[in-house]
Image (tube, rainbow, N blue to C red):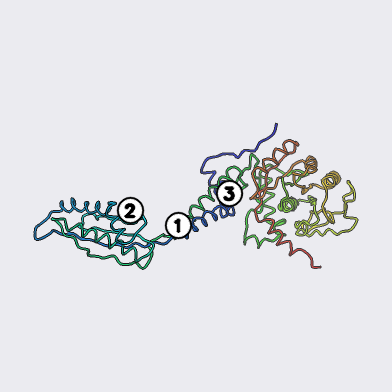
Amino acid sequence: MTARYRASAGPISETLSRGLLPGVLSRWPLILVAALPLALGVAGYAQERAAYYTASTVVAFQPRGSGSVGADVFRAVLPRYVAYLSSGDTEKRVQSALGESSDRLPVDVQVEVPADTANLNISARRSRPERAAEVANAFAQAALQYNRRDGLLVAQQVAPAFAPRRPAGPRRTQFYAAGLIAGLAFGVGLAALFERWRPRVRLSQESVEGVQVVARFPEALPGGSKAWNLTDLVSGPSARVLALQAVAAGGPLAKVLGVTALRESAGTSAVAAALAAASVGDGRSVLLVLRSAERQAALALGASPSPSAAERVGRPGQTGRSSATVVPGLRVLAPADDEWSSQELSAIVASVQRDTDMVVVECPPLAAVDSQVLVTAFEEVVLVASSDSLCADVHRARVLLDRLGVSLRGVVLTRRHLGRALALSSKKHQAPT
């Protein structure tokens, strides 16, 4: 039967606070890549739109002669002026008087009567400020001519239209803001879609795809990633907290413990070194086996593999000498150069486990076929996953270990910048040439 990965669905609040929201925010490069084209497109559209100017004029009405006229008359008569100025015949006459050949007047001229007033407001919009004023005044003159046939009211243009100094639109700032908001919304939605179907591991999780999170390494980040001290990280309080959490999650650690990941991870050597260093005590002897001579953890513990023939693994079963460390009772076995293969590591485990109380081995990634043979030699395995790795990788690793019949203690979550911090800190431990 082929195992299929499926994202687990929990309560909405838990999904947002512990998985979806942090995952979406961590995908900020995707959000920016998705938002930028849309925001730039809207900005370009706003720039392409030509500026327009709006000029307004006011025509006021009052009773003709000395007679009195009620408000009802104004409410009944003034709408006729609006209808007259909005009619096609009036628009054609104004177009002819101004030399307008386009048919934009029905769209660009607005005539209205404000509530509870005896005024007629006329607004005209054109691409040139002078033309906008001319159109507004022309419609006001058309209203005055129509008023000559009105026996009740007399009209007067009390506020002529003048050429505006600033364009009325388009309001490009609003376009920019709308484009930015729309772009960010699209980017966040796309990131949420990715996070929903391809979620990442989060430090706040208590389990990942059914696998218990036994520890988070390091638990605290005082001073930021650049302030980490590699020696303190693998042999100080962070290492002791890691071991205590691992023991509390499943009892005492196995005598032969493997530390691995599905893919190449910068945290496997640090986690293996921390577990080994924290397991020393009460006269116990612990051997840490690192698969590479260039692991920063070996430098941090004071181990200095030399490229001599005695320390190299020439053939399976010949392990060479281990190096003492700054932690009493802990020794490190590492190749002088390159790295050990899974077959060589298997031979090492078989030959040294009788002479030491505990063996902690850093394993190659589980994706390698020979590594899958190696992990069967361990009594227990700890899986390392960084906080930005896919939950699907943890799922595949769990399925693979179950198929091999290997006991999985749980997952140790490492912080995303652990690898960079180890690289920066390890430079302090390298001797000058």
Callout 1 crowding tier (Cα within 10 Å): few <14, some 14–19, many ≥20: some
Badge 2 or badge 1: first in the primary sequence: 2
Q: Examine the rendered structure and indicate whether residue 283 appears above or below residue 212.
A: below
Total numbered labels? 3
As shown in the figure, which amino acid type bears the numbered disc 2? Answer: Pro
The relative height of residue 210 versus residue 172 in the rendered view (above or below) is above
Reading the image, the residue beneath label 2 is 106
Residue 280 placement, left or right of 249: right
Distance from the alpha carbon under mark 3 to that under mark 1: 30 Å
Q: Determine contact: label 3, label 2, CB under 8 Å.
A: no
Q: Between 272 and 60, which is closer to the camera in this rendering? A: 60
Front position among marks 3 and 2 = 2
- Mark 1 is on which residue type? Phe
Secondary structure beneath dot 1 equals helix
Residue 23 — which label? 3
Asked which quadrant contains residue 308, the reply is bottom right
Q: Is 2 rendered above or below residue 250?
A: above
**Residue 97 position in % (x across, y down):** 29, 61
In contact (CB < 8 Å): disc 2 and disc 1: no
User: Closer to us: mark 3 or mark 1?
Assistant: 1
Q: Residues within 10 Å of mark 3 (few under 14, many from 20)?
A: many
Residue 175 is tagged as 1
Q: Is residue 193 left or right of residue 110?
A: right
Q: Residue at x 52, y 50 (%)?
A: 186
